[in-house]
Amino acid sequence: MADVTFGWSEQHLMVRQALRQFMEKELKPIVWDLEDGKVLPYEFARKLANTFGLAELVRGMWARRKEKKAAGDREAAAGEIAAFRDPAMSALLVIEMCRYSPGAALAFGASLGLCGQTILSKGTDDQIERFAIPVLTAEKVGCWGLTEPEAGSDAFSMRTTARLDGDYYILNGSKTLITNAPYADTFVVYARMKSPTPDNAAREAIHAFILERGMPGLSTGQPFKKMGMHASPTGEIFLSDVRVPRANLLGGKEKDPSRDQAVGVLMGERTAMPSMCLGIVERLLDECVRYSKERKQFGRPIAEFQLVQQKIANLFVTREIIEMYVHKMIWMQQNGIKSMKEASAAKLYCGRATVEAGLDAVQVFGGAGYIRDAGVEMMVRDAKLFTIGGGTDEIQIGWIARELLKD
Ligand SMILES: Cc1cc2nc3c(=O)[nH]c(=O)nc-3n(C[C@H](O)[C@H](O)[C@H](O)COP(=O)(O)OP(=O)(O)OC[C@H]3O[C@@H](n4cnc5c(N)ncnc54)[C@H](O)[C@@H]3O)c2cc1C
């Protein structure tokens, strides 16, 4: 009996089918090369953006916005950016990518979502044109740097500083665990503004700056060797007296700091995570159903053993709940509803449930599941990031409890 498809339009289902075919043709064959670092995910990202008209869509949106702004219609110009964001299509893209490579999806999301969308949301027109468009079309690779060696969960205790010096800000400090940092062209980096007059509290605020590879004093480390998400390079950013033009202060206004905007990005990351989880769990379920019918022990397919059936049924239940979360997150975005409690709950539940589902899938495969070729152990290692990145589980619990318990 076919699955009930809920919450997707006919058009979504058509796009989903096309995405599935594309991933099977273009992503599946390079999964192990991505895992081993023999191939980087960026060429694939470019192919994806071009095949599905994303690059064209971005350029079209920007051209129409400029036209409307030139004609004096500011409201219509702003509407172009709002209309460009389609949470359902973004979710489908992520789900289908995660069926084969959650790491490639992470690299894609960190570049276009975290870096590109941050500049698109808060940047000046000049910043959008120069920095966001090339990242959103996947021509350039972007990264988003908040975390520091001494400032992880407590991200806003950051030590990276920015000091105004004529027409430049001088940035010093370092960032770590940054997705795409080793290969990024464009960097969104958060820093604490240092005032020449230390009693000026407003000047101590957190601001975001747009940096480019090649700026003297900016360097990046080698990709870290990680537990999972091997397809997405992660690394450090070092800033030593980097002279950043004043025009690269995100949004262009010193009186408008970026701390709330960074919290908004984290909320967006948490909102998007259920889609990554859904792609993984759907794939695990498909693989477990197939394998349990093929694999015979004690003269019967293992699918006939009730303890195997229990795991497969649990995988299906997990898939169902995660899919409902995906639709809730899409609905919230479509309706402009921002709630950290809801986003944190979605990330907390889906992340944990996906790790559990992955371990169950390895168990269904037995020894074969412990071997890389089956593809299920990679999914568990990749899914573990969901309980850490974008704020750990403990931090999500803190957000949920704080919002529930405030007066
Ligand atoms: C693969 C990967 C990619 C990443 N990509 C990016 C990126 O692109 N950009 C970026 O800015 N960051 C990125 N990160 C960083 C990520 O956001 C941080 O790892 C995360 O926020 C946790 O910070 P931390 O690692 O310093 O852990 P810590 O903050 O040191 O936490 C250690 C432990 O202490 C617990 N803990 C801390 N504070 C509390 C508290 N108040 N109450 C209870 N428990 C607490 C934590 O939950 C955790 O269990 C990435 C991380 C990884 C692993």
Image (cartoon, helix red, strand yellow):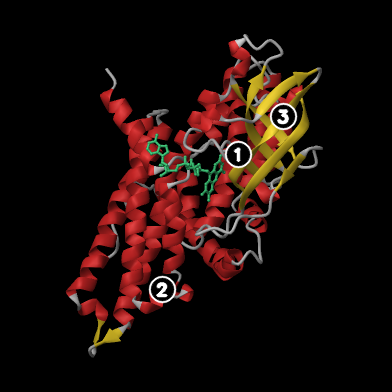
Task: Determine whether the beta carbon of the residue marked 3 sits less than 8 angstroms from the nearest atom of ligand 1.
Answer: no
Picture coordinates of residue 81, whole percent (x, y): 58, 30
The circle on residue 144 is 1
The circle on residue 382 is none
Amino acid type, mark 3: Leu
Label tally: 3
The circle on residue 370 is 2
Q: CA distance from mark 3 to mark 2?
A: 46 Å
Find residue 204 and report its image quarter.
top right
Res. 45 in view: yes
State the SS at label 3.
Answer: strand
Q: Residue at x 55, y 62 (%)?
A: 22
Picture coordinates of residue 180, whole percent (x, y): 63, 49
Label 3 Cα neighbours within 10 Å, binned few <14 / some 14-19 / many ≥20: many
Q: Say if 223 sits above or below 34 in the image.
A: above
> Of marks 3 and 2, which one's residue comes earlier in the chain?
3
Task: Determine whether the beta carbon of the residue marked 1 sits less than 8 angstroms from the nearest atom of ligand 1.
Answer: yes
- Quarter of the image with the C terminus is top left
